Image: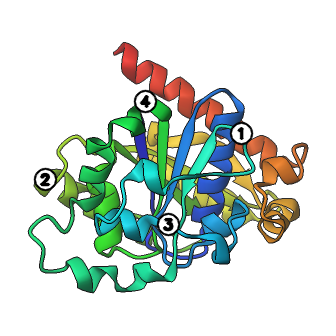
Amino acid sequence: MRIITIANQKGGVGKTTTAINLATALSAIGERVLLVDLDPQGNASTGLGIDRRDRRSSSYDVVTGALTVSAAAVDTVVPDLAIVASTLDLLGVEMEIAGAPDRVLRLRKALRSDRAVAERWTYVLIDCPPSLNLLTLNSMAAADSVLVPLQCEFFALEGLSQLLETVDEVRRTINPALAIQGIVMTMYDGRNNLANQVVDDVRAHLGDKVYRTIIPRNVRVSEAPSYGKPAILYDLKCSGSQAYLQLASEVIRQERKLRAA
């Protein structure tokens, strides 16, 4: 089982879209995937067709210890893809657990102590809130690696440096095994010279940490969540869906190299 957290403290970079569609793409190529929605906005849950009125269990229950991960997980419209949904209860969870000695380890303990998790799923993806808060720290403490969606825009590198500093701090203090899974460039518009410059700058700074696959701006990808479907189910042939399938293949190849090393 591999646990990957998808994080960027900057909003609007395609983080949740990446979480939904990477999870779907991994399941489409034969993996069994669990998506943990750790964002109080709950957009990943909505994007996978889980109506707010039907969320009887959630990641809030997992973080507070009321339910195990496997008990909180529900199936989605995608075969071999389950989700631990999010509810607005998560907005208050930081205050509830702030005084607990294990406050940053709640999710890690929940995932690692539930034997059914490793038996049922080969990948666990965690969708974080767009901030560096206690929920994001929980996700990094629980994860093997961090995947960072990065929008192809001028200020991209500024936010990235702060996130990488946080990853380093988590590695030093909480989770020594935490690695950077990779940087995926999102919302790319090839007609925009600035977008090309940003991609070149990020590759110059981070080299092979940047995935070859670039996620383009795509109307069909933007439309899909309103229908409660990942883009790959909504329109498999659109450029965005094809890019996420390529990204999933790249992630799998990367994992195989790590296991062989």
- x 50%, y 82%: residue: 88
Query: Within 10 angstroms of label 4, few (less than 14), some, or many (20 or more) residues?
Result: few
Residue 122 seen from this side: no
Q: Position of residue 109 (x, y in %)?
A: 24, 51
- At mark 3, the secondary structure is loop
Q: Which mark is residue 79?
A: 1
Left or right, residue 223 beside residue 67: right
CA–CA distance in space, label 1 to label 2: 38 Å
Looking at the image, tell me whether mark 3 or mark 4 is earlier in sequence order. 3
Left or right, residue 250 beside residue 233: left
- The amino acid type of the residue labelled 4 equals Glu
Left or right, residue 244 beside residue 167: right
- The amino acid type of the residue labelled 2 equals Arg
Query: Within 10 angstroms of label 3, few (less than 14), some, or many (20 or more) residues?
Result: some
Q: What residue is shown with label 4? A: 119
Query: Within 10 angstroms of label 1, few (less than 14), some, or many (20 or more) residues?
Result: few
Q: Is residue 256 above or below residue 241?
A: above
Q: Is residue 84 above or below residue 92?
A: above
Query: Within 10 angstroms of label 2, few (less than 14), some, or many (20 or more) residues?
Result: few
- Between circles 1 and 2, the one closer to the viewer is 1
- x 65%, y 71%: residue: 54
- At mark 2, the secondary structure is helix
CA–CA distance in space, label 3 to label 4: 21 Å
Q: Which mark is residue 57?
A: 3
Looking at the image, tell me whether mark 3 or mark 1 is earlier in sequence order. 3
CA–CA distance in space, label 3 to label 1: 20 Å
Q: What residue is shown with label 2? A: 172
Tag 3 near tag 4, CB within 8 Å = no
Left or right, residue 201 beside residue 105: right
